[in-house]
Amino acid sequence: MHPLSNLFLAIVLLISSLKTNAQSLNPPSDLRVDLLLNADKVWKNGVPAALSLQEAKQSDSTYQVALIANQNPYFSWVVNDNSDGSSQTAYRILVASSPDNLKANKGDFWDSQKVIQNQQTGIIYRGQKLKPNTVYYWKVKVWNNKQTPSDYSKPISFITDSIIKPYQTAHQPLVKSLEKPVLSKQLNNLNTLYDFGNDAFAQLKMRIKSAADGDTLQIHVGEAIDATGRVERKPRGTIRYRLLKLALQKGEHNYDLKFLADERNTGSKAILMPDYIGEVLPFRYVELEKNDKAIIEVQRYVVNYPFNDQASSFKSSDTLLNQIWDLSKHTIKATSFTGLYVDGDRERIPYEADALINQLSHYASDAEFNMAKRSLDYLIYHATWPTEWSLQNLLIAWNDYLYSGDIRTVKLLYPQLKPKLLLALARPDGLISTRTGKQDSSFTKSIHFSTFNGEKVLKDIVDWPQKGGFGLPPSYPGETDGFVFTDYNAVVNAFHYQALICMRDLALALGEKADATFYRQQANKVKQAFQRNFINPDTGTIKDGEDTMHSSLHANMLALAFNLVPIENKAKVIAHIRSRGMACSVYGTQFLLDALYNANEAEYGLQLLTSTDKRSWHNMLRSGSTMTTEAWDTDYKDNQDWNHAWGAAPANIIVRKLMGVEPLTPAFGTIQIKPQPGTLHSAELQLSTLHGKVNVAFTKTTAQFQLKTLIPPNTTGVVYLPKETENDKIIKDGRSLKAISDGKFWVVRDVKSGTHVWEVRY
């Protein structure tokens, strides 16, 4: 053959090869069983073990694994095709009893065959009956909208529980990671200080060489340091400090130091640490007393629920905002140390209000959904005393379904969720009250409430602490902005209305049409009564209650957050909110910032997020804390702690409101991207979802706003672009585009998956 012919043939083969490669589809990844990633991992006392599930099952030792108890578990995966408009059109799942069967593409327990469907989350297992205490193996392949098949995914295994049930939320065990200090230095008193860089719930591990038996080493462990750089021996509030005395052995030895249990946070209502982990203490610093021993190594085992640090990222042109993001994200990871949402270290008790903020910020930090489900299930049967917090169960339930797309927990709890609406406390116009004698024993039993911290019935809270403080002088005003408590409370009824809206939507999702109609009608009735009874006709603002003319920040921000303010009153309500500043606790800011961003008050929202006043997240950083604190400062709550996730609202506010990424349909099937930069010049976000990663980045100048988006395959987007005038020029991927005007935004609907560049030229 002529050399040119050989060259031509080689070129043809190369082009053919390139076309084939270009048309190939990467296999699915991020396989989940009952929403769990890494269901095939094995741990020994919280530390990763290099064993398969089958090896762990057959071992005489005890290992920790995720157990799947559901008779029909759910499967999900991520489609790896970022071409424009990509979607899944079909899938095939194989579930086998052995790795060999799966390798041979023999799904002896389930072969779904090719299913023509774009669903990639919540695929119900429909194979043979699963056996208890058994390891199964599965994989999946998909076809895209070009009918291109992928190869099968990497095989994943899971193990069933000893008892198979219709439904039980799966969960991972708690895990440990070994960390070294980021800094060590000798202090003026010749003690040695070790700094781990951030606060975490942990255990202390040391390696020491001693010349004799019986010597004692004194060790100071704590969350804070004093002005001299030593570990703070008498910290204020519930900031943690412990003195450990270690009896040394002759020679070189490893020492795993034990923290004694705290009487309060290991009480009857607390979530206890499992035996395979042991007791933990939140600490950042370790100080060793001056000694002549050879300190070879000081480390700590950090304990938390499995957390993917790469699942989310945020960076902006504002350095302080970046620090607040890091503070909030680290808080969510660190405070997961019990596997349920708890109130920090002082009590370690789940509270509904903490759980709601924890849940939203967890979703903003990691694509993990089962901790929220387990916390909701726990809270339903372990109610706390504030009225509003009972109602927040419904908000948690709705978020659970909206973000995970998995309604099984809600379906199981649906009969128990109904009483949490507190309809038994309503008068004919729909408004509810805890102060009119309706809380009898049958009512408290229906909501699973028993005596809690001395309270025998629900009581309105609004915010915490209330007037009189907590460990502070009686004259202290508290965090309620002077709220006047009356029989019919505007804040309570704002939560009641929002709970009814959530219950209406959950009933629709469950196919309970009659219930949905009832809750819709009840919500409409409450809204009318709210506006009729709580709007001050003279000022247009929201009153605290029927029998007062006082208008607190809380009454107004909750009404605005939950769409209870008539259009004609919004300007007055917003002006009143702006006049009150940060006159709420760190908990209240969740609803304050939601209200502001929902009303497109982005500049003021950003101003509060990045405030440097004493009542700010900057003050938490300034105080030395590396987790969000329970109060703005110990001056505002005398027993506050430095590890309270109900202060971590910025994590979800940055994602949901500032960057504007929220699910419009369950599991982010339809994604809203509505950035509200305010005065921020640039920012970029990566957020993991069950469908894959969402990327959003913007830059803002006086001449234009530019937005880059990556929408994962098999989803669609609704993109909002900031609007200056009716003459703005909208450009998508280099081409002019007609967008719909919507108030302060341009809106583009039905945006296909893939990467897009948007411009608004002013």
Image (cartoon, rainbow, N blue to C red):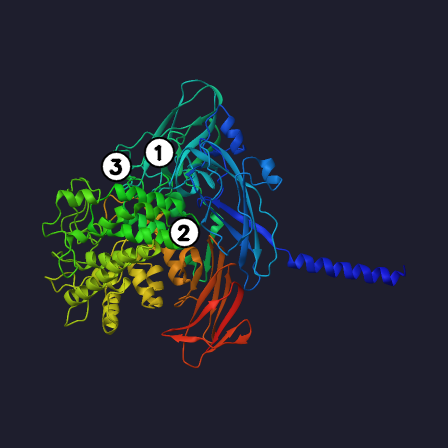
* Amino acid residing under circle 2: Ser
Q: Quadrant of the N terminus?
A: bottom right
Q: Nearer the viewer, residue 464 or 579?
A: 464
In percent of width and height, residue 37 lies at 48, 44
Above/below status of 349 relative to 468: above
Residue depicted at 30% across the width and 63% down the height: 595
* Amino acid residing under circle 3: Lys
Mark positioned earlier in the residue sequence (2 or 3): 3
In percent of width and height, residue 686 lies at 48, 57
Q: Quadrant of the C terminus?
A: bottom left
What residue does disc 2 label? 404
Q: Nearer the viewer, residue 417 or 128?
A: 128
Mark positioned earlier in the residue sequence (2 or 1): 1
For mark 1, give the secondary structure: loop
Compute the Cα span from label 2 to label 1: 27 Å
Q: Residues within 10 Å of mark 1 (few under 14, many from 20)?
A: some
What residue does disc 3 label? 269
> In the shown orientation, is residue 119 left or right of residue 480?
right
Residue depicted at 41% across the width and 45% down the height: 333
Task: Indicate which disc residue 273 carries.
Answer: 1
